[in-house]
Image (cartoon, rainbow, N blue to C red):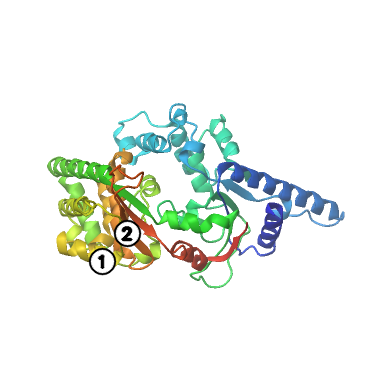
Amino acid sequence: KTVTLFSLITSYQWAHPEVGRLVYCTRTVPEMSKALEELRKVIDFRVEVLAREISGDEAPPSGLAAGHILAVGLSARRNMCVHPEVSQEGDRERVDEMCRQLTAPWAREKGKTSGCAHFEKYEAALNHQSQLLETGIYTIEDLRAKGLEEGFGWCPYYAARRLIHAASVVVLNYQYVLDPKVSLASSLGGAPSLPGARRQGPATATEPSIVVFDEAHNIDDVCIESLSVKLNRQRLDQSFGNLTRLGNEIDRVKRDDASRLQEEYKRLVQGLRQAGQIDDAMADQLQSPVLPEDLVTEAIPGNIRRAEHFVALLRRVVNFFRRYLHVERAQCEGPLSISHKLEEDAEVDSKSLKFCHERLRSLLNTLQVANLDEFTPITKVADFVTLLGTYSQGFTIIVDPYPEAQGIYDPTLILRCLDASIAIRPVLKRYQSVVLTS
C-alpha cells in the first residue's frame, strides 16, 4: 500500500512540477521511519530502471527521475534533540522547556544561558548557505546523525522544520495537520521550492499539496480529541496561581521596562492577527486551539488589550468555573448556554472569550516567559474559553463529579467536540487532494 502510494504520487509530482509537496501522515515515529525507508526503495528502483532504458545518445534523467528528491521526517523535540543534556530527559514537556530556555531570543541576546551549540550552528548555517542538506531522503535517525556529524552539527529539530519548506515529501504525525494547537499548515502548503519546480496558473485558496493519512480508521477520534479540553479543580487552582504570577510580572515590567507593555498594546490596537508578532519558538508551543479561518480578520477586543485588564478577565473566568464545578450530579449543557452564564455572572462576553488564547500568547511572549510549562493550567483555561467563544455548535460541556469512581469526588469539566468534521474540514478545503487509507 505504502509503496503504491509513493510510486503514484511521486510520479505525478515528476510529471507535473507545479504540484505541491506530498504530506504523508502517520500515527507513530516507527511508522514514519518505515514510510521513508519505503520511499527510498521506490526512488532507488525508479532511478535504476530509467537508467537502463536510456540509449547512448539520450541525455541522462534529471529531477525526480534521477533521484533528486528531498524528503524529511519531522517529530517532537524529544525524538530529535541531540543536545547532550536536554536529550537525556524523557518527558516531552521538560525537553520543550529546556530547549526554549536555551534558544529563546531574549535569553540569547542577554547571554543568560550558555546556549545550545547545535542551535547556534543551525543559525549560522542559515546565514551562510541557502539549503541545509543536499537532496535525499532523511529519516529522523538520519537527521539526528547529521546533527552529531562534524561537518553539520546543527539542531535536527529546527533543521527539519526549515527543510519542510523545500521538501517534495514530508512525513509527520497526524497532529501536525489536524490539531490547531500544533498545526504546521502554514509551512506545509504550496509547492516545494526545489530547482526546476514551477507554478502554473493564478494562485487560489486551494493549495496544490497532496495529503495522505495512513491507517486512518481512527482519524475521527484524533479530530475530536484535538478540539476537546478537560479541566478539574486542581487545574483551576493552579490557573489562579498562574494569574497571580502574571500579575506580579506585569507590575515588575511596568516598573522596569514599561515600553515593552506599551509596544504590545500598540500592536494589539493595530489589530494584528498574530498578536505580538510571536517568534517561531513561542508559536510552536502556543498555537491557537481554534482553526485559523475562524479568527482571520477580527481584531482583539479593546477590553483585553491592556495586560492588567486581560488578567482580571481571566480571574473572573477561573472563579466562574470554580463555582460551576460545585455539583453533585453529572450535567450537560451547550456552548451558548455556558457563554450566556459567563456573560451574566462574570461579565465576560463571547467576543472576548474568542481571543483569550491569542491574547495570552501575546502576553507570555511580551513578558519573555521561558518556562511555558508552568503556565499550562491557564493555557488550558484559555483553550477552553476560546473554543467556547468560537463555536456555538458541534460541542457540549459536561460536568462529571465522579469521573474516576463513585464516591471519589473530583468534579471534572469537559468541553467535548462532537463533530469530527470541524477539524477535518479545513484540510479538505486547503489541499488539492486528500487520501485516507486503512
Q: Name the residue: 24% across, 41% down.
A: 238
The x and y percentages for residue 112 are 30, 31
Q: Nearer the viewer, residue 259 or 81?
A: 81
The x and y percentages for residue 223 are 47, 57
Mark 2 and mark 1: span between their CA atoms? 10 Å
* Left or right side of 96 for 313: left
- Where's the N terminus, which quadrant? bottom right
Tell me the element at label 2. Answer: strand
Q: Eyeballing the image, is 268 above or below 104?
A: below
Residue, far bottom: 202
Label 1 environment density (alpha carbons within 10 Å; few <14, some 14–19, many ≥20): few
Q: Name the residue: 57% across, 30% down.
A: 149
The residue to which callout 2 is attached is 397
Q: Eyeballing the image, is 197 above or below 138?
A: below
Q: Nearer the viewer, residue 113 or 178?
A: 178
Tell me the element at label 1. Answer: helix
